[in-house]
Amino acid sequence: MNTENQNIEVSLLLEAIYQKYGYDFRDYSRASIKRRIKNTLSMSGLKNVSEMQHKVLYDERFFNTLLMNFSINVTEMFRDPIFYQGLVREVISNLSKRSFVRIWHAGCATGEEAYSMAIILKEAGIYERSRIYATDFNEDVIRKAREGIYSIDSINKYGKNYTQATGNQSFSKYYTARYDYAIMDRSLRKNIIFSDYNLVTDHVFCEMDLIVCRNVLIYFNKKLQNRVIHLFIDSLTPNGYLCLGLQESIKFSDYADQFKEISRKEKIYQKI
Ligand SMILES: C[S@@+](CC[C@H](N)C(=O)[O-])C[C@H]1O[C@@H](n2cnc3c(N)ncnc32)[C@H](O)[C@@H]1O
């Protein structure tokens, strides 16, 4: 099939998903969405995107499978240890001067990023006067995030990341190991609020001192990236911080001049 027809089919599929289920993928990066569709096609035995569109409309379970495929949930605790070094150096030391600290993790996947932040805040002595709002549009991953249970193999990797990042304590004090899994300590979970939130269709989340949105904008096209960065500007306090993924930048957005670059390498910005 030629590319033009393929593009039309993909647009019709995304429109059908939006109209039927309210999830809006129309401004996600086309290259990434096409890869996900191709992947789902090869697993489902469906012949083409038009057949997929029909199945999505009449089979909600299939839609949920497709949704899981569209939301890429790869994550780690202390992912990119170098980022956490920058975070502690440039952001946490300043936030600790505020009487109360509100942090939003937008696109938190299965929660590892939020638990990493809780550990950082505990070690900085400001956890008790902080709230971490950790959101994702995928309800399944939010459920897992709330449980805070990870495989022992993952935990071992996260421990190594922690040591490289900031770790000056024993990582094992933050979880209880049981056979082949580990449960994160309840004291970390206490001030984290996990909830569903869709960056494309939901509204401002107010008065945040820090927004961490790492490895999410990379899946959006420029128009949607602009919408989300504008949403972050409205959600931040004056001088609030924004942290993006190492492959992301606000440099090419329409709102670059509304932020000061705090650390280029670690993608840390401050609202002017
Ligand atoms: C690759 S993960 C990144 C997880 C974590 N921030 C990190 O860097 O390790 C991307 C996450 O963004 C979420 N996501 C994608 N589109 C979203 C949207 N419109 N609203 C909220 N979350 C979204 C996905 O469900 C997924 O959990």
Image (tube, rainbow, N blue to C red):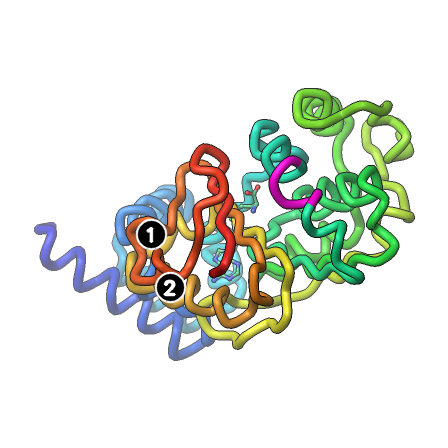
Residue span colored magenta: 89-93
The answer to whether 226 is drawn above or below residue 78 in the figure is: below
Q: Position of residue 50 (x, y in %)?
A: 26, 62
| Pointer 1 residue | 33
Q: Residue at x 52, y 75 (%)?
A: 202
Nearest to the observer: residue 58 or residue 203 = 203
Q: In terms of secondary structure, where does tag 1 sit?
A: helix
- The residue carrying pointer 1 sits among few (fewer than 14), some (14 to 19) or many (20 or more) residues within 10 Å by Cα, namely many
Say if residue 131 shows up in the picture: no
Q: Which callout, 2 or 1, points at the residue further toward the start of the chain?
A: 2
The answer to whether residue 197 is magenta is: no
Circles 2 and 1 in contact, beta carbons < 8 Å: yes
Q: Position of residue 2 (x, y in %)?
A: 8, 51
**Residue 81 in which image quadrant:** top right
**Is 135 left, or right, of 17 in this rendering?**
right
The answer to whether 261 is drawn above or below residue 224 in the figure is: above
Q: Position of residue 96 (x, y in %)?
A: 76, 50
Distance from the alpha carbon under mark 2 to that under mark 1: 8 Å
Q: Residue at x 78, y 27 (%)?
A: 152
Nearest to the observer: residue 214 or residue 25 = 214
The answer to whether 164 is drawn above or below residue 130 in the figure is: above
Say if residue 77 shows up in the picture: yes
Q: Residue at x 85, y 24 (%)?
A: 169
Nearest to the observer: residue 181 or residue 115 = 115
Q: Position of residue 260 (x, y in %)?
A: 44, 51
| Pointer 2 residue | 25
Q: Which mark is residue 22?
A: none
Q: In terms of secondary structure, where does tag 2 sit?
A: loop
- Majority secondary structure in the magenta region: helix
Amino acid type, residue under disc 1 in the picture: Ile
**Is 109 left, or right, of 48 in this rendering?**
right
Amino acid type, residue under disc 2 in the picture: Phe
